[in-house]
Amino acid sequence: MRFAPFTHMAWAKAPPPGIEIDLSRSGWPSLPLADLGAEPSDLDPAEMEGYGPTRLREALAARYGVGPDEVLVSVSCTHALFLAGGCLIEPGDRVGVETPGYQAIRHLPTLFGAEPVPLPRRLEEGWRVDPERAEALFRSGARLLVLSDLNNPTGAALSRRDLLALGEAAERAGARLLVDEIYNEFLPRGERPAAHRLHPRAITVSGATKAFGFGGLRIGWMIAEPEFVRQAYALNDYVTVLVPSPSARLAMRLLANLPRIEAKRNATVEGGRAAFDAWRSSERRVTCTAPAGGIVAFPRLPEGIEEASFVESLASRGKVRVVPGGFFGLPGHVRVGFGAEPERVREGLRRFSEALDASGR
């Protein structure tokens, strides 16, 4: 089997020279390790045996309101997504994938020899996942639907009502939902339980990368029923066996210090969001829904502007980087991040508007 290139990731890892304002990022900027605090968090070596680290699983279980046997600790959200796909997808399957969506989600079925079937999210519907379209997809033979919540790239949220309807549609068809909730971590934990808590046909994956500023830890997790967690850990024995002990120790400190870290993050995010909302309201040439949370949005460019050329021109002339919508399966849009300091967001968006001026639109 040949893996298709992850073109978005390759693009993200090779920024052009001279970029002054990076609005392509979807995660909160990295924090220094000092922000994790100095509380002792040593793990007994025995805790790393078997399906450890035990206390980290217990801490995540407490955060999500589930049992420790419903938690798998991985070395990133992407790793958890891969393990879930490996347990759920068989060669020749039809698998529903949201569009627009992150490339790792849209291409996940192809990694296991399955056929991805796009399930459209539409701008005119607020990027909602329509349960009726999902049910039709299940009736066509799809055994799995893979989504993100908050959606990457739009920032749209799944409503509790729609998520329950999706779970019920999956249950009627004997299918499953796989929900990447890494951007949901920007929302208050009590605002909505994990998808797995709302419906047993749903599997949640998430991680410490986007909302907490510690992507370098490479810690993620899966929330699912105990039997599925055991299956995923068995597959993991072929991949990494255990998460690195230093990362597990630091993740314990992260969870212990989350209220302080989230307060620091929210102060930055609120300022960037206000700057973006002001620009979105005044820049009439783009069409953009307000994201439910997080730090990204997905404006549609004026008709006649080819987004890849616009992104290249904005980078070379305006020294600002945004992400072409083609990476998410929907050309004509760009993903804009507003998780930086408000003044940098405002300046980057001002240059964005100047680039629209230069395009004659």
Image: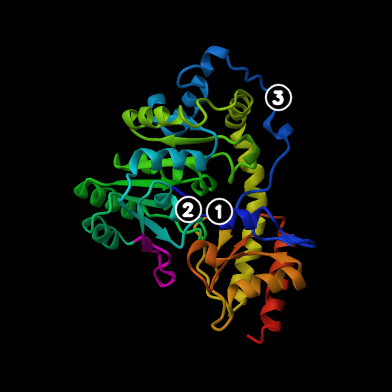
Q: Which residues are magenta?
A: 117-129
Packing grade of label 2 (10 A; few <14, some 14-19, many >=20) is: many
Question: What kind of element bears circle 2?
Answer: loop
Is residue 4 in view? yes
Given residues 353 and 96, the one toward you in this image is 96
Judge whether 360 appears above or below 11 on screen. below
The residue pinned by badge 2 equals 150
The residue pinned by badge 3 equals 38
Residue 280, quarter of picture: bottom right
Q: Are marks 3 and 1 in contact (CB under 8 Å)?
A: no
Identify residue type, mark 3: Ala
| Residue found at the very far front of the displayed protein | 1
Given residues 206 and 11, the one toward you in this image is 11
| Residue found at the very far right of the displayed protein | 18
First-in-chain label (3 vs 1) = 3
Q: Are marks 1 and 2 in contact (CB under 8 Å)?
A: yes
Q: Is residue 174 left or right of residue 77?
A: left
Judge whether 361 appears above or below 290 on screen. below
First-in-chain label (2 vs 3) = 3
Position of the C terminus by quadrant: bottom right
The residue pinned by badge 1 equals 294
Question: What kind of element bears circle 3?
Answer: loop
**Residue located 63% across and 58% down the image:** 11
**Residue located 45% across and 41% down the image:** 82
CA–CA distance in space, label 2 to label 3: 32 Å
